[in-house]
Amino acid sequence: MRSDEVKKGHQRTPHRSLFRATGLKDEDFAKPFIGVANSFIEIIPGHFFLNRVSKIIKEEIKANGCVPFEFNTIGVDDGIAMGHDGMLFSLPSREIIANSIETVMNAHKLDAIIAIPNCDKIVPGMIMGALRVDVPTIFVSGGPMKKGHTKDGVPIDLATAFEAVGKFEAGKMSEQELIDIECNACPSGGSCSGMFTANSMNTLMEAMGIALPGNGTILALTKEREELYKQAARRICEIAKSKEQTEKFKLRNILNENAVRNAFAVDMAMGGSSNTVLHMLAIAGEAHVNFNLEDINHISKNVSHIAKISPSLSTVHMEDINTAGGVNAVMKEMTKRKDDILKDNLTITGETVLEKIKDAYIKDTNIIHSIDNPYSEVGGLAILYGNLAKEGAVIKTAGITGNRVLTGTAICFDGQTEAIEGILGGKVKAGNVVVIRYEGPKGGPGMQEMLAPTSLIMGMGLGDKVALITDGRFSGATRGASIGHISPEAAEGGMIGLLKDGDEIHIDVDQYILTVNLNDEEITKRRAEFTPVKKELDSSWLRQYRALVTNASNGALLKTDIF
């Protein structure tokens, strides 16, 4: 066992003495040591109950002949951090989480990991850290939140609450209606109930084979979810107690190129958050997988979009997907279009992908459409290119509410705060393309989510009349013609930094085009006069992050070698 390095032999007498101080007995030193990486934190609705989850898991690990050691990571609630400078810390938290997993696991030579994530950056951060350690790993998330309802019975969620602010500001909603939504949009613990970033990533873990079936859709705080926790604990012990299985189920043997491609395929079929692109590129990098941004459109062209979930369809939530057959049903239906839509690959259960889904089927075709009746013949995400995005930009096509081809005039804002003020002040009109720059990984720094401005635009009734482009990113709850992750970003001299009010911007989603209609002479002139904005920062961590981070087309990974 890997843990023998800290517990076997006379030279490890002091090490065993320290272990005995934690309660270990003689017989425990012959058992596998299992790291229980918990993201419990009281301020996040998807995480405040995870201390109870880890207790269930640890008891099951002990009952199955292993020794659990729980440790914690940090977490940021993107909804609470939204719309102010707290959001600057959200994406950087992913790197801290990854570093925490790597640090604790390698410093103490633990044999395997069972990771308990749920929301936002915590899921990819844990995956990235676990890939560096490369021991058998099972991810079992806290689970999605129940959908909310207004007093009139209309399904609502966090996206409803953000858009309600725009409706209230525009005089389209009363204060009583606003309060009704506030009090009922998030009715319980769990990751927000739609196909936002958290549930997108929890779903993709199923697709990659690193979580058990049901991980993305079984509701939090249910008996069914408790059984999933116990299954995960039993399975990690089964693997850790076998030398052969320990070698076979190392994380990189499962999360390989096939797994990454399967994740993107399922993402396309279910119209996941645009943030999945950022995180999956980072995960691919940590897995040493050769996967590039331009590969995504090829996958999209071959995958039908068969499940629409809030925010793309406000009446459908994760619990509905679970009732309709879950992620396995989606994956099974996907394979009916082409034999090679999903790559057969080992999963943590011991089955291959195709074995895992062989008996799955759609139980409600109103929720998960058949391959013969898709929402679209192409996937729910696309990568756009052009002189505005030479290294790519991301759009969640599943969330588009207006035309997929449009040309509009730019109205430019240097940052989200300025944009929110401009939108509320009536500067944005039908036919505009809202430009929000200096919000990329380096320029933000930290790549803020733009849920506040996009929700205001939707709430004011402009969602199908304007587009928004940014070198920042979007919440999974964003809908409308919202294009993010523009690379190169403004802070590194990207074209988005050279735009001026009134510039004509052309977008063609189906042709993967994002351009500004300027001649080469004008672009050269502007570039010669251009100096990127460099924001003053009080934060030591954000200054470190700005110095080391790469752009979004590289997954916003930190440079590991600067010499």
Image: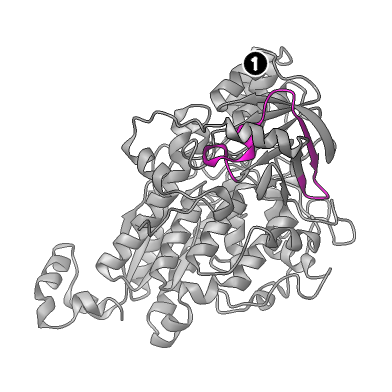
Q: What stretch is highlighted in magenta?
A: 488-513
Dot 1 crowding, Cα within 10 Å, few <14, some 14–19, many 20+: some
Residue, far bottom: 244
In the image, is 456 to the left or to the right of 472?
right
Against 522, is 14 above or below?
Answer: below
Coloring basis for residues: one colour
Q: Residue at x 32, y 65 (%)?
A: 105
Q: Which residue is drawn at 62% across and 62% down?
A: 292
Which of the two residues, 93 or 219, is positioned nearer the viewer here?
Answer: 93
Which of the two residues, 326 or 535, is positioned nearer the viewer here?
Answer: 535
Against 238, is 549 above or below?
Answer: above
Q: Name the residue under label 1.
A: 424
Residue 71 percent location from the top left of the image:
31, 56
Q: Which residue is drawn at 36% across and 59% down?
A: 101
SS label for mark 1? helix
**In which quadrant will I find the C terminus?**
bottom left
Residue 141 percent location from the top left of the image:
50, 55
